[in-house]
């Protein structure tokens, strides 16, 4: 259930002195996630407009090859944005259901500094490090 809207003071930053994931914290991260989401959507739209606005039959082979490389990079970026948008939407869902800010593996607090740096984080630092070590071991064993 979505929490009631909380009015944050201008320049508000979550503090360790406040109760972890109090309504102000949740509202701060909701706004941070929504702002990030809107920026990604805007950038994605610009990418689409750039690709649509291109004239494809102009230039020599080198120019066309260069343009294809740029288009490929733009499409990869757009795919990355699409995945990020999904993670942002999931994080917003966790804000609404009250599970935001807690590790999906251990249930421990993820921490304000980590969430401020990476608002879509789902694991506390210890669990993230274990996951990364496991991924590395899987890669190394191939």
Image (cartoon, rainbow, N blue to C red):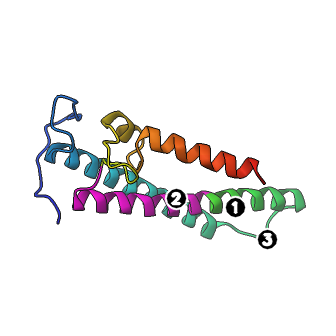
- Residue 116: horizontal and vertical position, in percent? 35, 38
Query: Which quadrant of the structure image shows residue 49?
Result: bottom right
* Residue that appears at 31% across and 36% down: 112
Per the image, label 3 sits on a secondary structure element best described as loop
Query: In the rendered view, would you say 89 is above or below 127?
Result: below
**Residue depth check, mark 1 versus mark 3: number of the one nearer the observer:** 1
Per the image, label 2 sits on a secondary structure element best described as helix
> Image quadrant for the C terminus?
bottom right
Per the rendered image, the range of residues in magenta is 77-100
Q: How far apart are marks 1 and 2 (CA)?
A: 15 Å
Q: Mark 3 points at which residue?
A: 57
Is residue 45 inside the magenta stretch?
Answer: no
- In the visual, does 127 lie left or right of 70? left
Q: Mark 2 points at which residue?
A: 81
Query: 18 or 8: nearer the eye?
Result: 18
Is residue 79 inside the magenta stretch?
Answer: yes
Q: How crowded is mark 1: few (under 14 residues within 10 Å), some or many (20 or more)?
A: some
């Amino acid at each position: 259930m979505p929490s009631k809207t909380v009015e944050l003071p201008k320049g508000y930053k979550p503090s360790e002195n406040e109760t972890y994931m109090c309504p102000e914290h949740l509202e701060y991260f909701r706004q941070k996630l929504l702002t990030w989401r809107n920026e990604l959507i805007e950038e994605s739209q610009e990418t689409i407009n750039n690709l649509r606005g291109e004239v494809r039959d102009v230039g020599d082979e080198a120019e066309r090859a260069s343009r294809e490389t740029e288009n490929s990079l733009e499409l990869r970026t757009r795919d990355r944005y699409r995945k990020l948008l999904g993670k942002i939407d999931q994080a917003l869902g966790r804000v609404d259901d009250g599970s935001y800010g807690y590790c999906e593996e251990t249930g421990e607090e993820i921490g304000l500094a980590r969430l401020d740096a990476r608002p879509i984080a789902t694991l506390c630092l210890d669990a993230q490090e274990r996951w990364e070590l496991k991924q590395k071991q899987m890669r190394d064993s191939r």
